[in-house]
Image: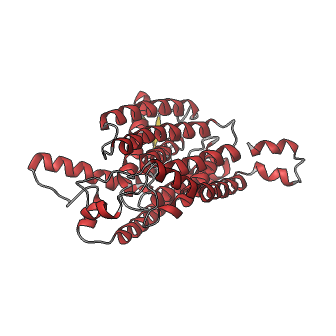
Amino acid sequence: MLYYLTQFSDGGDIFNLFRYITFRAGGAFFSALIFGFIFGRPMINLLRDRQRNGQPIREDGPEWHIKAKSGTPTMGGVLIIGALVVSTLLWARLDNSNIWLVLFVTMSFGIVGFFDDYKKVTHSDSKGVSVKTKFLVSIAIACVAGYWAVQLHPESLSGMLAVPVFKDLLINLGFLFIPFAVLVIVGSAHSVNLTDGLDGLAIMPIMIASVSLGVIAYAVGRTDFAEYLDVHYIPGTGELLIFVAGLVGGGLGFLWYNAPPAAVFMGDTGSLALGGAVGAIAILTKHEIVLAIVGGLFVAEAMSVIIQVAYFKSTGKRIFLMSPVHHHFEKKGWPESQIVIRFWIISLILAMIGLATLKVR
């Protein structure tokens, strides 16, 4: 919205600053951060009043969770989404379809998560909306996003899968690109959801992954950077850096209250929305494979569940003491803060590896 102040600029005044994506990204970051600090405590108090028993704790989870985490309100993702949406609408170019696509995915998955959280707290049941229903709705949202992304991509890249490191290698998926996009977006959303099991565990890795993708979006959206880095140029994706900046600002504002011991959980409202958002950015920037690297922690968490279930069904035994894998380390006696910080470090390392693929050609 503020971008349109540039129409009053003669090229040498303060309004000219709004032409620059980096300046507006900084504005989005601080706007979202301030939003989080202003509305965080009132929102938590409201959630506490409405959720007298807080988020239901899984009875099959680590025993100490029932005592330590009971009574903590959920749906804190509303704070992140609110900060993110307000800052994006304020600072991004609203004539950019990439922005509207990621906002659509974020809000849609956020609504799915909200209903899931709402059912949990109103029925005092940790199961919430059925897994089948969540997946079917998630697939429908991702189908729309995948088809929309195909329309936005340049004709030479539409339906193509770009392979990192090999600059000229494109795999033509054709009509299979939309099912592939569904796999990326739905997989990203639900793997982040599985990771969100300890105080602060999911929010920092999602911010790290989104910053990595934001840098990539900015690079592939500029002809000079794309040419220097030998990556495919995709017009308009640079604006996604503003969305990412709002996500990070809102995420930090939320982390202030989610740091151990958490005053609020993001719930499915936040985890599904943010996971879906990074999946959509990866699709738009043609860096789906890189997402699997920078979001490797989420992949590992999801795979630990898949492996555990498959192995148990076939042998009746378990590989992990408990899945997702962060609970395995809890069962081994690792303190919660130690698990969280080490997983943050792993996320940062994976992000550096993912960003390195920009230059390794």
Relative side of 20 to 299, left or right: right
Question: Within the image, what quadrant is residue 301 found in?
Answer: bottom left
What residue lies at 11% left-to-right and 46% top-to-bottom?
A: 314
What residue lies at 25% left-to-right and 61% top-to-bottom?
A: 62
Image x and y of residue 38, in percent? 63, 57
Whether residue 357 is visible, yes or no, is no
Relative side of 9 to 349, left or right: right
Q: How is the image coloured?
A: secondary structure
Q: Is residue 172 above or below residue 339?
A: above
What residue lies at 51% left-to-right and 57% top-to-bottom?
A: 207
Q: Is residue 243 above or below residue 140?
A: below
Image x and y of residue 172, in percent? 43, 34
Quadrant of the snapshot with the N terminus: top right
Whether residue 124 is visible, yes or no, is yes
Q: Is residue 343 above or below residue 102?
A: below
Residues 347 and 118: in front is 118
